[in-house]
Amino acid sequence: YVNPLIAWATEREAIRKRRVAGQPAPWTDDLIFQKYRFCNLRRRDDKVSQWLIGNVLSQRHIGFSDWTFLQFTALCRWINWPPTLSAMTEAGLWPKRTEFDWDKIAKFIDLRCQSEKAWTGAYMVRAAPKHQYGKDIGKGEFVARIVVGEGMEGVKKKLFQALNLHSAEAVWRVLHSIPNWGSFMA
């Protein structure tokens, strides 16, 4: 008897390894895996995580504040689209060692949305309802300024306390307490 979950996980990881090794598609004989897309078993193996590892974590040692590093990493997860993140770097919006200009970042993202893809299709990012802020705001402003900038600022002390516990669950609880941060994003 083979546990179907273990069989699925084993084949999904084997497909990832074949793809990364440069083998030609299809990387499996399983028709379901050929036809549909599935997440990687480990988040660190997805495209955005690989971009973060190569472009953000690799620069961590250059003297960034812990706070700036955490905020930018969170913003990267919300955007989840390496071309936008790279364009932000080219525009001088990152790296910043001390603090971000959330309004400038928001405008950059909202402007990018007008002409090209700025977000991934992996999950839905919605702007805030007009009645909540008294005006219609774009996704860029909502995510950069309100969700990440102001939202994380409101839990800064608790977030560092949770990080010092070395507990993923404690960090998740703090992030989940931020308005608009659902359990998946936290």
Image (tube, rainbow, N blue to C red):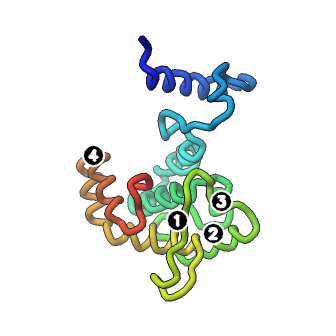
How many discs mark residues in the rendered view?
A: 4
Q: Using the image, tell me which numbered label, if any, was put on residue 83.
A: none
Which element is circle 2 on? helix
**Res 113 visible:** yes
Q: Residue placed at 26% from the left, 62% from the top?
A: 158
Quadrant including the N terminus: top left
Circle 2 is placed at which residue position?
A: 109
Q: Earlier in the sequence, mark 1 or mark 2?
A: 1
Circle 1 is placed at which residue position?
A: 96
Residues at marks 2 and 3, CA–CA distance in whole angstroms: 8 Å
For the residues labelled 2 and 3, say whether their Cβ atoms are less than 8 Å apart.
Answer: yes
Q: Earlier in the sequence, mark 4 or mark 1?
A: 1
* Type of the residue with mark 1: Lys
Circle 4 is placed at which residue position?
A: 167
Q: Residue placed at 57% from the left, 83% from the top?
A: 136
Which percent across, then down, holds residue 34? 68, 29
For the residues labelled 3 and 1, say whether their Cβ atoms are less than 8 Å apart.
Answer: no
Callout 2: 10 Å neighbours few (<14), some, many (20+)? many
Residues at marks 1 and 2, CA–CA distance in whole angstroms: 17 Å
Residues at marks 4 and 3, CA–CA distance in whole angstroms: 31 Å
Q: Which is more foreground, mark 3 or mark 1?
A: 3
Callout 3: 10 Å neighbours few (<14), some, many (20+)? many
Residues at marks 4 and 1, CA–CA distance in whole angstroms: 27 Å
Which element is circle 4 on? loop
